[in-house]
């Protein structure tokens, strides 16, 4: 994607997704023009979608190693790359499709001289796409915090999202680390994009749903009880996990937020909208869910985000 200059959005324009209809609202998250305007309207201020680096650290510390070449996909204005750097990870590359955003972040974190920033569209296709020049196996781990969620809203029935997943699989081919996807999308939706044969995994997902529900009942239904869970809620391996060696699903409690500034309030409403929009527009290719599976995951999703750890 090439981001062209655009005028800052007014407060009412930034709320475009709240009224004109779900179709327009959904498409905007997959549009580079939307992100260019959004970042300019907020002066490229830091904002964390879904979870912060510190929220995720209890899980990430068991998945990443300081020697890993780490790619932060769709970095936006998140601090997750700098957070990793401050924890001793020096081989971190942050990429985003929006050139102006990447330039602003590179300037903001210029003191972290060993950290890289690059404008790169990971869902691009064709011989002229910059991502096609990146060698296979260039990275040991890829972190995605809501990029897949944004791509799945494109009006192309999941083509962009699947192309992105295939690109990531190529970039970490033969590596030691995982593809980590932080998402609001529950397994019945996200595994349609991450797995080669998602329908085959549904029976095992049903069992995992029931087991997790029992754990939640034992925790008396408190969302806070999930914050410390670093064991997978579901795990797929072997043929069910293809094209991955193994896929683990973790449930992480949504962060508790007590107050927002005016801009943060708009951002949070946009995040809530993205969750609603994606639910309406996500690809549903594959076999229907077993009765109760989708509703059980959806109920859990009201209190949690999901982290998909795909091992090669």
Image (cartoon, grey):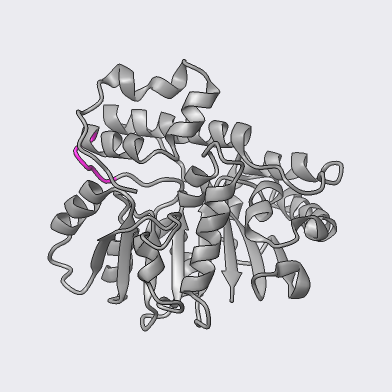
Q: Residue at x 17, y 60 (%)?
A: 109
**Frontmost residue, 282 versus 233:** 282
Q: Give 233 or 121, whichever is nearer the viewer.
A: 121
The residue at 59%/46% (across/down) is 158
- Image coords of residue 114 (percent x, y): 20, 74
Residues in magenta, as a range: 42-46
Residue 268 falls in which quadrant of the image? top left
Height in image: 229 above or below 9? Answer: below
Which quadrant holds the C terminus? Answer: bottom right
Residue placed most toward the observer, 268 or 38: 38
Which percent across, then down, holds residue 41? 23, 32
Residue 3 appears in the rendering: yes
Residue drawn where x is 23% and y is 70% of the image: 115
Q: Is residue 252 depicted above or below 172 in this figure?
A: above
Instruction: Say which quarter of the image contains residue 108.
Output: bottom left
Residue 239 x/y as whole percent: 77, 72
What secondary structure is the magenta-colored segment mainly? Answer: loop
Query: Left or right: 282 with respect to 69?
Result: right
């Amino acid at each position: 994607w090439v981001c062209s200059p655009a005028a800052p959005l007014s407060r009412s324009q930034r709320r475009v997704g709240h009224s004109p209809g779900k179709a327009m609202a959904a498409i905007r998250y997959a549009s580079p023009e939307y992100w260019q305007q959004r970042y300019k309207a907020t002066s490229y201020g830091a904002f964390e979608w879904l979870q912060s680096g510190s929220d995720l650290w209890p899980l990430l510390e068991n998945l990443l190693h300081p020697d890993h070449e780490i790619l932060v996909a769709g970095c936006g204005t998140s601090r997750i790359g700098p957070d990793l750097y401050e924890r001793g990870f020096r081989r971190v590359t942050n990429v985003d499709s929006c050139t102006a955003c990447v330039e602003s972040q590179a300037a903001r974190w210029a003191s972290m001289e060993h950290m890289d920033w690059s404008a790169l569209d990971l869902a691009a296709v064709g011989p002229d796409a910059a991502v096609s020049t990146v060698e296979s196996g260039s990275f040991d781990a890829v972190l995605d915090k809501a990029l897949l969620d944004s791509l799945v809203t494109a009006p192309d029935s999941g083509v962009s999202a699947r192309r992105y997943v295939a690109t990531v699989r190529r970039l970490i081919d033969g590596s030691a680390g995982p593809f980590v996807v932080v998402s609001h999308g529950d397994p019945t939706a996200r595994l349609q994009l991450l797995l080669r044969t998602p329908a085959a995994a549904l029976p095992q997902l049903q069992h995992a749903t029931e087991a997790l529900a029992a754990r939640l009942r034992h925790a008396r239904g408190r969302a806070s009880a999930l914050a410390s869970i670093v064991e997978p809620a579901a795990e797929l391996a072997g043929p069910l996990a293809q094209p991955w060696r193994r896929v683990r699903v973790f449930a992480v409690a949504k962060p508790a937020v007590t107050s927002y500034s005016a801009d943060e309030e708009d951002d949070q409403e946009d995040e809530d909208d993205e969750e609603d929009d994606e639910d309406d527009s996500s690809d549903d290719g594959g076999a229907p869910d077993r009765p109760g599976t989708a509703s059980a995951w959806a109920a859990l999703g009201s209190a949690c985000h999901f982290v998909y750890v795909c091992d090669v």
